[in-house]
Amino acid sequence: MHVETHLPLGKVDPGIRETERPVDVARVHHDAELVERLGFDGLVLTETKEDPFVVMAMAATTTERIALTTAVAIAFPRSPTVTAMTAWTLQRASHGRFRLGLGTQVKGHVERRYGVPWHPPGPWMEDYIAAVRAVWTCWQERTPLDHHGEHYDLTLMNPLFDPGPIEHPFPPIHLAAVNAHMARVAGRHADAVRPHPICTRCYIDEVLRPAVERGAADAGRDAGTIGAVASPLIVTARTDAELAERVSAVRSRIAFYASTRTYRPVFDLHGWSDIGEHLSVLSRQQRWGEMEQHVTDEMVHEIAVVAPYDTIAEAVATRYAGVCDTVEFSIPVESPDDEILLAEMVAEIRSR
């Protein structure tokens, strides 16, 4: 099993405080080098407070082996030609180690944060990926740009704007998925699917994997060649007291997801629909402090991987064995002893 990690390095606590930790861009070069030295297979960054393409470019300059992934960049606010060029540049800069992870975001953010009109995301993403690859094909194979889709018509690429071929394969495209429809899109078009952190092992097995397989069949592809990357909510600590505190934090995050209809299929599968509906009411009333108490221990342990330091690596590997070929994992690194501990955990998961 491959093991990757997020920036900021050591982002383990999956509660609200995650949103309070921007990347220290002055340390990106150091942290990326450390990730490689600790034995990870890759480094990823989600588009929240920083542009993940910029950070991955910085990481490319101090690493030689690890994969560098946007996990994920928001697709629709960007022209597919802009995304194609950025990925092309990063694939050259990293000598073939860049992976383009894309996500849709939800309607409210696309419209009200990015100012882009909303369309049904499945067909939109299919057209987007095809447009990106059409631009890459134009550059790599020296053929005219000729893409015609529902959302994008791309026909102009004169020599001034054509960077030409690269000595590497096209960047693999990873697609984030919460529901079966987007997983089916991934099966048709993506190189790997990235289940949302809220997706349980059961949901991946019973909903997402079959959808990926149906999408692969639609396109005449071998579903076995489509990767799956788990990005679980990991709750771990050295002591029981610290672990209990972090369980409280993850309850808050699960409550947020349960209150949001986009993520409701996961909760419905497990019979938690009534809890989700009640949390939606509380969120609309802005009664945030009351929401956490409605998240049961069963929900926490089904969604998150909860274990102390001495067994967390085994718990993560066991949870995703046979369903995902890559897992994102980390613990905080604050001392040389932490580096040794994390390297040992990474080695244990990789051995599975």
Image: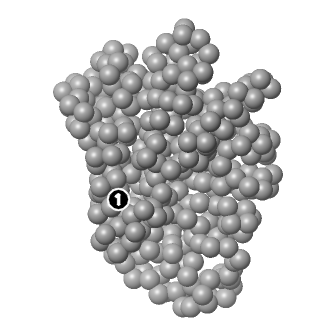
Q: Which residue in the structure is indicated by mark 1?
A: 212
Q: Residue furthest top?
A: 241
Of the pair 21 and 160, the residue shown nearer to us: 21
Q: Is residue 79 visible?
A: yes
Image quadrant in which the C terminus is located: top right
Where residue 40 sits: x, y (%)? 67, 44
Task: Identify which residue is drawn at 46% across, 64% down.
Answer: 225
Where residue 236 sits: x, y (%)? 55, 22
Task: Identify which residue is drawn at 56% across, 47% down.
Answer: 1
Q: On the rendered structure, is 169 left or right of 197?
A: right
Q: Residue furthest bottom?
A: 143
Of the pair 85 and 337, the residue shown nearer to us: 337
Where residue 143 sits: x, y (%)? 56, 91
**Secondary element at image label 1:** helix
Q: Is residue 26 visible?
A: no
Task: Identify which residue is drawn at 77% across, 42% down.
Answer: 37
The amino acid type of the residue labelled 1 equals: Val
